[in-house]
Image: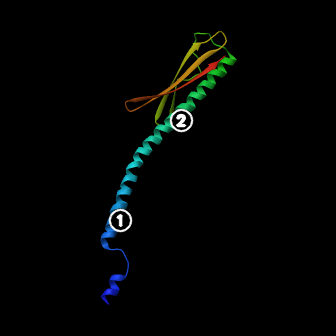
Amino acid sequence: MEQNIKSKGGFAIIEIIISLVLVSFVLIAVVAVFPKMTAQRKVISEVDQAHVLAMQAMERVQFLSQTAPYAANAKPNPGYTSQRLGNTTFTIDFSNVVNNASIKTTTVTVSWRKGNKTHRSTLTGAVR
């Protein structure tokens, strides 16, 4: 009868404890990654917002230059220099480089601060 009990398969308590410890380590590692992923997602979202603002500003500058060309040294004025989206204020700056009499390169720089760090996104395009 004792031989019959030992031959049956099953999990010993030590195997179950080892399995629980291993699963706990995996769960701790996965949970530790979530705050970093969330912080990175916020940064990516801000960069995307800055790119959209830069593209909108460049399109506005190009539109204004077609309707009323500005002087070679004049700074384009699309009508805004900053924009607040959510908790972030984006500052928009413009600069020009004259390539020749008819084509000018305009650079739109969108910057924003998070904590002690300043982030920037730059877009350069030709304006006639």
Of the image marks 2 and 1, the number of the one nearer the N terminus: 1
In percent of width and height, residue 7 lies at 35, 82
Spatial separation of the CA atoms under disc 2 and disc 1: 43 Å
Side (left or right) of 57 relative to 17: right
Q: Is residue 59 left or right of residue 45?
A: right
Identify the element where label 1 is drawn.
helix
Q: Which residue lies at the image location 35% right of the left edge and 61% below the top edge?
A: 22
When asked about the image quadrant of residue 101, the answer is: top right
Residue 127 percent coordinates (x, y): 64, 18
Q: Residue furthest right?
A: 67
Please identify the quadrant where the C terminus is shown: top right
Q: Residues within 10 Å of mark 1 (few under 14, many from 20)?
A: few
In this figure, which residue is indicated by the disc labeled 1? 19
Q: Residue 59 appears in which quarter of the rendering? A: top right
Q: Is residue 15 above or below residue 117?
A: below
Residue 46 position, x and y percent, is 49, 35
SS type, badge 2: helix
Q: Quadrant for the N terminus, please.
A: bottom left
Which residue position holds label 2?
48
Residue 101 bears which disc, if any?
Answer: none
Tell me which residue sits at (49%, 29%) in the image: 90
Amino acid, disc 1: Ser
Residue type, numbered disc 2: Asp
Q: How many marks?
A: 2
Seen at 42% across and 49% down, the residue is 34
**Residue 17 appears at what percent x and percent y?**
31, 67
